[in-house]
Amino acid sequence: MVTIAALIGDRTMRARFTEASASYGGVTFYDTAAQLAAAVADGAASIVVTEWRDATGATVETTVRDLHADYPTVPILVYASLTPRGARDMLAGTRAGAIEVLIADHDDTGPALRHRITSAQSVALAEHVASRLSALVPELVAQMLGFVFRHAQSAPSVTATAAALRVHRKTLALHCARAGLPTPSALCCWARLILATHRLEDPSRTTEQAATEMGFPSGPAFRSALMRYTGLSPAEARERGGSAHLVQLLTAQLADAAGRTMSHTEGDRHSPAPTLESR
């Protein structure tokens, strides 16, 4: 379950937020940015909601930047009223590393809050995984991974992904093949599998819900793809660590491909120059 650490000063807004977050594991309110950071460091919070200023009027910019850098999978949402000052606070927050914004008296109702939190979780995980994998693949493939993870919820096709990167889909396929990587369509499916499995880490979410939220046509289609790529059922994937386990599987697969490519490159480099007899 999601445990929220929140820095919200106004008692009325706290009460409203408490009611909206009742379906989660709990919300704990803090008065200072330091307390907020400590809750994340101690593992007491898996998501952060904060106003841009604490009770003293000081901004939480440094804390947001530090949390974003040190705990990239913990999404941070900036909470503010829809006023000129609130708009400036939301902009400053996203620039500092906040993933999402919550508009007071609009996004702090049950369904709206759930949507915002789910979106923030997916974006934070997607950015972290794409960054982690980018070092294992060629630059164009890294760009492709970044795109498909950010947009996994809409299940972009390889053609759409290629168009967004301003290349032909065959170019993506060629770069993947040369590096010994899975096909672009397989990597797109991996992204959706990782994020769908992450959503299943919330025990209140069904396999069907996680599947449709990540663009799979049905729960059985998700189960089939998960078994095809990982050999696991949704329950088995959850038991082995959920999305973190899938990230490990994909990382190992890409690292193995990178190792094979490097070995071939080194072998070619040290091969003797062809002689007249070998030509």
Image (cartoon, grey):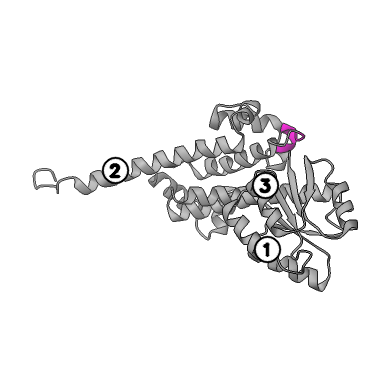
The residue to which callout 3 is attached is 153
Q: Amino acid at mark 1?
A: Thr
Relative depth, front residue between 225 and 87: 87
Query: Tag 1 or tag 2, which sits nearer the N-term?
Result: 1
Which of discs 2 and 1 lies nearer the camera? The answer is 1
Mark 2 to mark 1 CA distance (whole Å): 43 Å
Residue named by callout 1: 94
Q: How many marks?
A: 3
Q: Residue lying farthest right?
A: 12
Q: Which residues are magenta?
A: 204-211
Q: Is residue 156 magenta?
A: no
| Residue lying at 68% horizontally and 36% vertically, measured from the top left | 201
In terms of sequence position, does the residue under pointer 3 or pointer 1 come before the other?
A: 1
- The image shows residue 28 at horizontal and vertical percentages of 78, 48
- Disc 3: CA contacts within 10 A as few (<14), some (14-19) or many (>=20): many
Query: On the image, which quarter does residue 2 sit in?
Result: top right
97 and 261: which one is in front? Answer: 97
Q: Secondary structure at mark 2?
A: helix
Asked if marks 3 and 1 touch (Cβ < 8 Å), the reply is: no
Q: Main secondary structure of the magenta part?
A: helix
Please say if 85 is above or below 165.
Answer: below
| Amino acid of disc 2 | His
Camera-side residue: 65 or 191? Answer: 65
Q: Position of residue 149 (x, y in %)?
A: 59, 49
Q: Visible in this render: residue 156?
A: no
Residue position for label 2: 264
For the residues labelled 3 and 2, the Cα–Cα distance comes to 36 Å
Disc 3 marks which amino acid?
Gln
